[in-house]
């Protein structure tokens, strides 16, 4: 069984101000990210986020693994690898004296979301904020803010089957109607191991529950 991949907590900045580099990376057109210095060396062999900058608020758009860099020592060498790095002679990111190209491996897009942290080369990726609800007179955080909930779908069935096992493993949470586990199952409209199309949240039928 394949080991579950952890979500990176650090992302590298990709400047899209003069060219849509992140779109080219996610589409597979651009497979090498270039830098004037070996600034991405700390991330070699690591999974990182791809953070779009230069066009408004910094935004996480995907993930990739950073490979060993290639050194370009001349314009001739740099131009010969254009099909991989996609940096043309008229680009502000064109080679000066030397340039380093880092292969981006196993690229995958993700749902775009703003990143609040700052950084020149990279920045911290904060986990999505949890949803909040007032239940039983207290505020409860559960699930992930922005995550798409689709009751009555195979994705919903997978969640309900998985969380049903958690209900058995954590009887205290299962017995508390205001636990994050129970609230998440309500949001997914779980009936046992299945997710039904009728979503109690959408229909406003959560008894004693107010979304905030």
Image: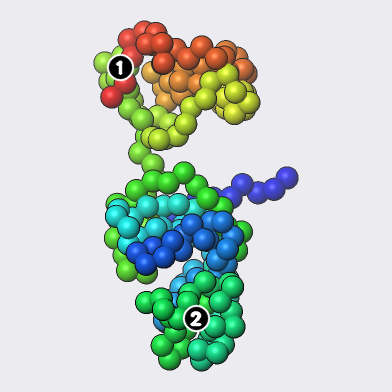
Q: On screen, 69 above or below 212? A: below
**In the foreground, 28 or 140:** 28
Classify mark 2: helix, strand or loop. strand
Q: Position of residue 31 (x, y in %)?
A: 57, 67
Tell me which corner region of the image, top left, top right, bottom left or bottom right, holds residue 180: top left
**In the foreground, 205 or 183:** 205
Q: Position of residue 165 (x, y in %)?
A: 61, 25
Q: On screen, 115 above or below 99? A: above
Residue at 55% x, 66% y: name it: 30
Q: On screen, 85 above or below 126? A: below
Q: Earlier in the sequence, mark 1 or mark 2?
A: 2
**In the foreground, 82 or 10:** 82
| Farthest right residue in view | 1
Rendered image coloring scheme: rainbow
Instruction: Kindly report the distance in space between the C-alpha atoms of the residues bearing marks 1 and 2.
Output: 53 Å
Classify mark 1: helix, strand or loop. strand
Q: Position of residue 11 (x, y in %)?
A: 43, 60
Tell me which corner region of the image, top left, top right, bottom left or bottom right, holds residue 124: bottom left
Disc 1, disc 2: CB below 8 Å?
Answer: no
Q: Point out which mark residue 104 bears.
A: none
Q: Is residue 188 visible?
A: yes
Residue of label 2: 100
Residue at 44% x, 77% y: name it: 35
Q: Point out which mark residue 210 bears.
A: 1
Q: Is residue 71 visible?
A: no
């Amino acid at each position: 069984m394949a080991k579950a991949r952890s979500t990176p907590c650090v992302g590298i900045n990709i400047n899209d101000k003069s060219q849509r580099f992140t779109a080219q990376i996610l589409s597979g057109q651009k497979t090498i990210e270039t830098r004037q210095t070996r600034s991405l060396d700390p991330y070699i062999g690591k999974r990182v986020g791809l953070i779009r900058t230069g066009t408004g608020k910094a935004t996480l758009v995907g993930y990739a693994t950073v490979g060993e860099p290639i050194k370009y020592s001349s314009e001739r060498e740099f131009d010969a690898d254009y099909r991989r790095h996609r940096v043309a002679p008229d680009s502000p990111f064109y080679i000066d004296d030397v340039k380093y190209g880092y292969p981006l491996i196993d690229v995958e897009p993700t749902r775009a979301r703003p990143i609040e942290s700052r950084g020149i080369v990279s920045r911290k990726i904060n986990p999505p904020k949890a949803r909040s609800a007032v239940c039983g007179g207290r505020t409860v955080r559960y699930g992930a803010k922005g995550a798409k909930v689709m009751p009555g779908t195979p994705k919903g069935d997978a969640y309900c089957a998985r969380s049903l096992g958690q209900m058995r493993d954590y009887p205290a949470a299962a017995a508390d109607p205001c636990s994050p586990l129970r609230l998440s199952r309500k949001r997914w409209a779980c009936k046992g191991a299945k997710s039904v199309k009728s979503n109690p949240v959408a229909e406003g039928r959560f008894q004693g529950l107010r979304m905030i």
